[in-house]
Image: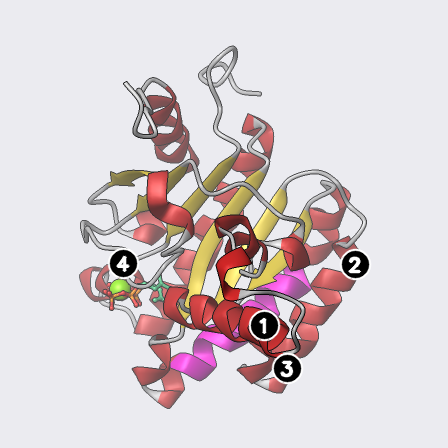
């Protein structure tokens, strides 16, 4: 635990919208893919710091259901980077007792990336340190739709009456639910690059999340800035509708 974090209120679940790789690339006169590569290096450092700080769940938004609109070259390049990340980092993550989970329909991503993801899931499955969730081909509306379809099937089968559907059942049917260890909703959602929107991220789970924004472009976002934002969050008063 670092000095800043010691004795402070560390949230259980922090989620990050890693935005600004493209603008960072433009600013530095390099290709968008070089920007994504720099972003991956930044992500590596944030995972390490989250672990040191004692955060239990770190969720990163790596690829949205809307990101398929980008050029084939960029999309392919992002998934190649994921393969590269798993190749170079999996042993270290495993050593750190990190459990990797995927939020999203990763069956639709390129085969090499599916293979890497499955290897990461399998290797780290029984670890019980930091849970590192990668939101990959993730969309909040798609996630809710899928939950509705699953619950509807139970209703149709006669196992459940519509009036018996609860909020907890909906939470359980999301990617963050039973299939990935029923994690708490994010206490804090950080977005970099100065944009202040959710872009279809964790729409159900964000009901009471604190939101924090920074102008830093994702590749420039440092573990120290991350830690400062998380600690600043710890002193906010969360009322959950009470007084
Ligand atoms: C975020 O950076 C990474 C992904 C969406 C995959 P962007 O690529 O969106 O960067 P900007 O927003 O164009 O700067
Ligand atoms: C959100 O960033 C998705 C990820 C960080 C993976 P985008 O760059 O895709 O979001 P918009 O298009 O600015 O809303
Ligand atoms: Mg962006």
Question: Where residue 51 sits: x, y (%)?
Answer: 59, 35
Question: Where residue 231 sits: x, y (%)?
Answer: 39, 23
Near-viewer residue (86 or 88): 86
Write the start and end of the magenta stretch as one range: 75-89
Q: Is residue 168 magenta?
A: no
Among the two numbered marks 3 and 2 on one chain, the one whose residue lies closer to the N terminus: 3
Instruction: Tell me if label 3 and label 2 are in contact, CB under 8 Å.
Output: no
Q: Which residue is mark 2?
A: 123
Q: Which residue is mark 4?
A: 20
Residue positioned 67% across, 65% down in the render? 87
Q: Which residue is mark 3?
A: 112
Q: Residue furthest top?
A: 7
- Left or right: where 177 falls relative to 191: right
- Left or right: where 119 falls relative to 75: right
Near-viewer residue (122 or 165): 165
Q: From the Cβ of disc 4, is ligand 1 less than 8 Å away?
A: yes
């Amino acid at each position: 635990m670092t000095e800043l974090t010691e004795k402070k209120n560390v949230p259980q679940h922090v989620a990050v919208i890693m935005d600004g790789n493209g603008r960072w690339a433009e600013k530095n006169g390099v290709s968008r893919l070089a920007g994504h590569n720099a972003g991956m290096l930044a992500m590596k450092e944030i995972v390490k710091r989250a672990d040191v700080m004692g955060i239990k769940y770190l969720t990163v938004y790596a690829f949205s259901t809307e990101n398929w609109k980008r050029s084939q070259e960029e999309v392919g390049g992002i998934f190649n980077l994921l393969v590269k990340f798993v190749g170079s980092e999996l042993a270290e993550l495993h050593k750190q007792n990190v459990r990797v989970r995927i939020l999203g329909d990763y069956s639709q991503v390129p085969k090499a990336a599916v293979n890497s993801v499955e290897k990461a899931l399998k290797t780290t499955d029984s670890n019980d340190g930091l849970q590192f969730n990668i939101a990959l081909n993730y969309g909040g509306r798609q996630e809710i739709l899928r939950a509705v379809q699953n619950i509807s099937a139970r209703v149709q089968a006669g196992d459940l009456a519509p009036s018996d559907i609860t909020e907890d059942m909906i939470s359980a049917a999301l990617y963050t639910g039973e299939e990935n260890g029923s994690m708490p909703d994010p206490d804090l959602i950080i977005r970099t690059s100065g944009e202040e929107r959710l872009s279809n991220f964790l729409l159900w789970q964000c009901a009471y999340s604190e939101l924090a924004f920074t102008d830093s472009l994702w590749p420039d976002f440092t573990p120290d800035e991350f830690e400062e934002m998380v600690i600043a969050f710890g002193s906010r008063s969360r009322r959950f509708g009470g007084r």
